[in-house]
Image: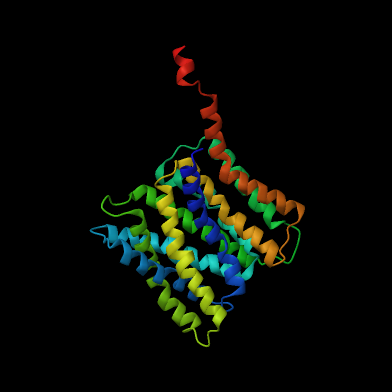
Amino acid sequence: MPSSHLKVLAMTATAPVIWGSTYLVTQTLLPADTPLTAATIRALPAGLLILLWTRQTLSGGGWVKAMVLGTLNIGLFFTCLFAAAYRIPGSMAALLLASQSVWVLLLSRWWLGTGFSMTAAMQCGLGMVGVVLLLNPGQGGLDMTGVGIALLGAVSMAAGIVLSKRWQRPPDVSQLSLTGWQLIFGGLLLLPLAAWSEGIPTNLEPQHLLGYGYLILPGGVLGYGLWFAGIQRLPAFSASLLGIFSPLTATVLGFVWMGESFGPLQWLGTFCIASALTFPLWVSLKRRSAQPSRHELTR
């Protein structure tokens, strides 16, 4: 593999690693029980900074579509992410949110009429089994409200992804710029809700400011910038595989810094969810390796 490709791969992988650290930042640096405020601060400033950089606007029906996508991908998803991070271990929240790939398959079948292949069926089955095992039925002490919030976030993001495929990106607007508009619309939706429900943040301590700054700059501007710069230069299967780094990072940080731990069934569930995320990629690679090369065909 060329060194330039490895550099791009490492650069792009930095984004999901940063996003996976959000759960630890929420639990250790942010004020307690303020998910709407955290979601607003992560979305709105980052969106404004991105648009100041790209300087691209929308036109026609693009405004309405960006508002809908901003509600699903940013407003609702960010709220669920932070609310879940406050209520359940970050490793579990990240893995439950990572189940969005399963919901994408199901919603694509219903909304886009996408065929449901054997690979997709196996991916859904692995993901669902993984979620059930991760929740470890029969063992008490788990905040089921937090679990439900995390799953709602996964469905919300999945719905946004499927609608994005259905509507397509306007040709005169970059993906980074479109993301910036979604961050702004999602943040504007959250702003009055956060002010009404949680009030204006006061008496902020240095660690709170550090946490909010991390959400805006590394978590928002840098993360999205690296991600979109990288996926434009990587093969689709390489970019898709990198998504696993977010729950992996959250799990490692949760174990090292927060003392989180899993039982045997939960480890099996983690393996099933990780397999569901990467299964179609391994199938694709296996099919490629099974195809005869051009040299073999012309011998």
Instruction: Give the vertical position of 58 relative to 210 (above or below).
Output: above
Most distant residue in the left direction = 60
What residue is drawn where x is 57% and y is 71%? 26
Q: Is residue 271 left or right of residue 65?
A: right
The count of marks equals 0
Most distant residue in the front direction = 3
Q: Nearer the viewer, residue 78 or 122?
A: 78
Across and down, in percent, residue 211 comes to: 53, 74
Instruction: Give the vertical position of 129 relative to 293 (above or below).
Output: below
Residue 41 shows in this picture: yes
What residue is drawn where x is 60% and y is 57%? 249
Residue 152 shows in this picture: no
Most distant residue in the bottom direction = 203
Instruction: Give the vertical position of 290 relative to 69 (above or below).
Output: above
Across and down, in percent, residue 241 comes to: 53, 45
Colour scheme of the picture: rainbow
Across and down, in percent, residue 196 comes to: 45, 82
Instruction: Give the vertical position of 29 relative to 247 (above or below).
Output: below
Q: Nearer the viewer, residue 74 or 172?
A: 172
What residue is drawn where x is 47% and y is 57%? 157
Across and down, in percent, residue 246 comes to: 56, 56
